[in-house]
Amino acid sequence: MSANRSRGPAASTLPARWLSSVSHAWRALRHPNFRLFFFGQSISVVGTWMTRLATSWLVYRLTHSALLLGIVSFAGQIISFLIGPLAGVLVERLDRRKLLVWTQAAAAIQSLAMAALTLAHVITLWEITALTALQGFINAFDMPGRQSFLIQMVDDPSDLSNAIAINSSMANGARLIGPAIAGVLIAAVGEGWCFLIDGMSYFAVVASLLLMQIKPVSIFRTADNVLEQMREGWDYVRSFRPIRSILLLFSIVCLMGYSYTVLLPIFAAQLKGSAATLGWLTSASGIGALISGLSLAARKSVIGLTRMEQIGVAVLGVALILFGMSHRLWLSLVLMVFVGFGLMQCAAISNTVVQSLVPEDKRARVMSYYTTAFFGSAPFGSLLAGVLAHRIGASYTVMLTGACCVVASLWFALELPRIGSIMRPIYREKGLLALTNPICDECEPVL
């Protein structure tokens, strides 16, 4: 009896602990501005993923060419790469909420134009390429603006990492839903309706931005000249080892790890599937990414993030190698879950660590390099994947890119001790790193 009574209080605290953990995982939503952004963006990103899948399927349906799939993807991303650093400087000089209203409105017009041309059955490869390039131009301003705007939506800086994780979870929840809806819609009524729904969904984000009550942020510039500010931002990224190493790893993953997406229509066809199969494969990777985002949202500390990133990239590489070998749909779907998990670990942790280290007066410029790391590497990766798949086949191409991710993971493992020693004092100064082990004052946590 006494033994049972002694276990009762401990057992009764389990639900309370669980509820506390859940509420902690969503703590950034207590900020009204971020809550508005979350719900508006949740609607919009579903449409964005529908458009991504519909564009890939439309290009493949019109051309049946792996090379042209790569070229269209390249056109959509190279613009962002070329103007990314300049866009970062300009974003720092602008009201970021107003900027995002304009970029979201422009993206809506782009998607509605795709819808009109596709539904009229007059769209050509050149028009798809031109409109995709226009979206790349919009993204060059939208992504650094959106990433650097997070700090203004979250009043408590300690909740920034949680906001980034929730934002990633939301994007990948949409990645799970959007492609599945798109696959069904394409099979039933065609790609044009996906573009139309995407175009309408942007109005939800615009409405959420206009409803926000934002405190103005003072920007302190060390140089007034645009070129000087660009050089200053580049010097900071180049000389500060933690950010340099993290962005380099992110660039490699974007170059090699993300390139599989452009080849997914080919794998869907090889598995004797349709647009619905392509939607399942994309949604499976979304499940893995969502799991990754939720696991990051539940974290209470930045301790261990870089080690998790290194492991995530290794998981991504191994999963891609096995995906290239797979000839069964069920196995390919399982492997896509691991691919999505590894990609999100790299993308979300890179974002979190960079934002937690960078000073406010360089935030937009540094985040523009984060954007450039993606849009600079991904287009060349898409083009490379298209060329290689044209020559050696999609399966061998994905296996090769997976092997490159494994090598990158091993390199980053060697970098961790060096960058950790630089990050610790910064985190301590910002109050983001708890005191070391109370039993061992000299023990340092692994970052």
Image: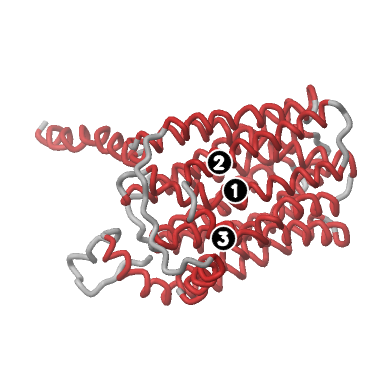
Image coords of residue 141 (percent x, y): 58, 50
Left or right position of 162 against 120: left
Image coords of residue 275 (percent x, y): 78, 34
Image quarter where the C terminus lies is bottom left
Q: Residues within 10 Å of mark 2 (few under 14, many from 20)?
A: many
Q: CA distance from mark 3 to mark 2?
A: 17 Å
Which residue appears at 76% of the width and 34% of the height? 114
Q: Which amino acid type is shown beneath numbered disc 1? A: Gly
Determine contact: label 1, label 2, CB under 8 Å.
Answer: yes
Which residue appears at 39% of the width and 57% of the height? 219
The residue beneath circle 3 is: 313
The residue beneath circle 1 is: 340
Where is 353 relative to 296, above or below? below
Q: Who is closer to the viewer here, 151 or 46? A: 151
Regarding mark 1 in the picture, which secondary structure is present there? helix
Numbered mark located on residue 172 in the image:
2
Q: Residues within 10 Å of mark 1 (few under 14, many from 20)?
A: many
Determine contact: label 1, label 3, CB under 8 Å.
Answer: no
Q: Who is closer to the viewer here, 25 or 241? A: 241
Image coords of residue 208 (percent x, y): 47, 31
Where is 252 relative to 32, above or below? below
Which residue appears at 58% of the width and 33% of the height? 44
Residue 25 visible, this orientation: no
Q: CA distance from mark 1 to mark 3?
A: 11 Å
